Amino acid sequence: MVMGSLPEDVDLAVIGAGVGGYIAAIRAAQLGLSVSLVEKNKLGGHCLNYACIPSKTLIHIADTFYSIKHSENFGIKADNATLDAQKMYDWRMGVSKKLEDGVGFLCKSNGVEVVKAEATFLSSNTLQLTNGTSLVFKKAIIATGSTPTTVTGFEFGGNVIDYKDALMLNKIPGSMAIIGAGYVSVEIGTLYAKMGTKVSIIARSDVLSKFDRDAVSLVKKRMEDLGIKIYTGAKPVSHSGNSLTLDNGQTVDAEIIVVAIGLVPFTQGLGLGNTEVSTDDKGFVRVDGTLQTTDPNILAVGDVIGEPMLAHKAMRQGVVAAEVAAGKKSGYDNTVVPAVIFSDPEIAIAGKIEGEGISVKKFPLSALGRAIALNKTAGFVKIAYDSNNIVKGVEIVSDDANAMIAEAVVAIEMGATLEDIADSIHPHPTFSEAVQEAAEAALGRSIHFFYGKSGKQA
Ligand SMILES: Cc1cc2nc3c(=O)[nH]c(=O)nc-3n(C[C@H](O)[C@H](O)[C@H](O)COP(=O)(O)OP(=O)(O)OC[C@H]3O[C@@H](n4cnc5c(N)ncnc54)[C@H](O)[C@@H]3O)c2cc1C
């Protein structure tokens, strides 16, 4: 068989070069396996090219633009600030390209063979590739990710777009209607509202319906302040021109319609029927605690195996799957997978903040020096702990919540107590002090907030 530089036989074939796949490939190569990484589109997959990184890049630009225009309190007047959408687009695309190239460099440096092709299983040890070659493997890792779903009557095309296209606009739309009210809708809606777009969110029940209402109420308030109109309990029925109609007859301005109702596992064309891999009733690939599928030769990681569909979960699973494929004793047994919503303010959660035997203490940012200085006092930290003071969960609603939550993850994974956090010196003046303050408050020794004589939360 003619296969160019491709090895005919490899120890490991990884299908999909998203964050789950490329990390698995690199880790396996580090462990001495010969590895081929097969990707039909871009190295870095959705996270680097279409989702996490582009959304956070644009959120940063929107925040910068909005803050410049709204800094009168600090004595800054810049009413005439403008946004060059083409330049913004070029920057956003440039960031993804840089990261994509970085993944290529890391793969090459670690001896991973990257193959640009679509892969289909012919059997439990052979893949057919669209470049006309085939690949025989001892082990394979499926890392094919997920794809957005649509709504009847709002199929993608014309001005109806998915999250990827919404993060690749080179002009700021006058109006945008977003169908769906999960974190993707909130992030996209908030960023465009800050750039001046008239944003409407159409929610079947409510915005971020699966999250703590205490946290969501602050985010909703901010969205409303930004002029975002939230239609709760509404169903979109049709659209025409720049308008969308709801089931109650209301019409919504919609130069652009973004459908963001969720993601489904992507296994199309993968030929799973030629293997022993099985899927659940939603189409997610079934795995055990070592990420082994029902086919002894095949493992799977990332979005394709189910919730939570988050990049950092896929990354950890990539490492574990590679180690298992290399015959090492490894397992996906993390206690917590943190989640961050890059809303305004951000919401970050690790572990659980309610449940039997769990107590919760809340520290408000209105009592934090850093938050007052930055005029960012809408927020709080909640810390949850058991009867032995072991930390079980932390929820942060704050600027920098994305970085602060890492402390909570380590604390929970290590079985830390309230005292461990309260007695560790946190740098001042930072938002991270709010986590320490919450732990101190839970111990009944709050300094910077007065909870009443009993020390109990008001
Ligand atoms: C708008 C948005 C924002 C997000 N923001 C965040 C965030 O801030 N933080 C976070 O943790 N998560 C975020 N996510 C989720 C995150 O993007 C995903 O969890 C992550 O990308 C999943 O990685 P993966 O490796 O499983 O799959 P993917 O990144 O989807 O990669 C799968 C790859 O497989 C390739 N592929 C598929 N089939 C084949 C085949 N047969 N042959 C060859 N190649 C194939 C695809 O082309 C793709 O490149 C966000 C998601 C969205 C939609």
Image: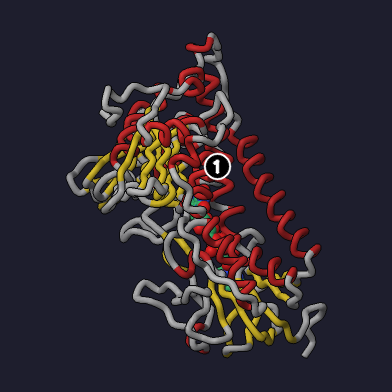
Q: Position of residue 241 (x, y in %)?
A: 36, 44
> 224 left or right of 57?
left
> 434 left or right of 424?
left
Image position of 323 with respect to 206: above or below: below
349 and 120: which is toward the camera: 349
Image position of 202 with respect to 120: above or below: above
Which quadrant is home to the N terminus? bottom right
- As helix, strand or loop, the secondary structure at mark 1 comes to helix
Residue at x-position 55% and y-position 24%: 429
> 42 left or right of 231?
right
Residue at x-position 75% and y-position 77%: 34
The reply to whether the residue tagged 1 has its Cβ within 8 angstroms of ligand 1 is yes
Judged from the image, the quadrant occupied by ligand 1 is bottom right
The type of residue carrying mark 1 is Lys
Q: Position of residue 220 (x, y in %)?
A: 33, 35
443 and 55: which is toward the camera: 443
> 20 left or right of 9?
left
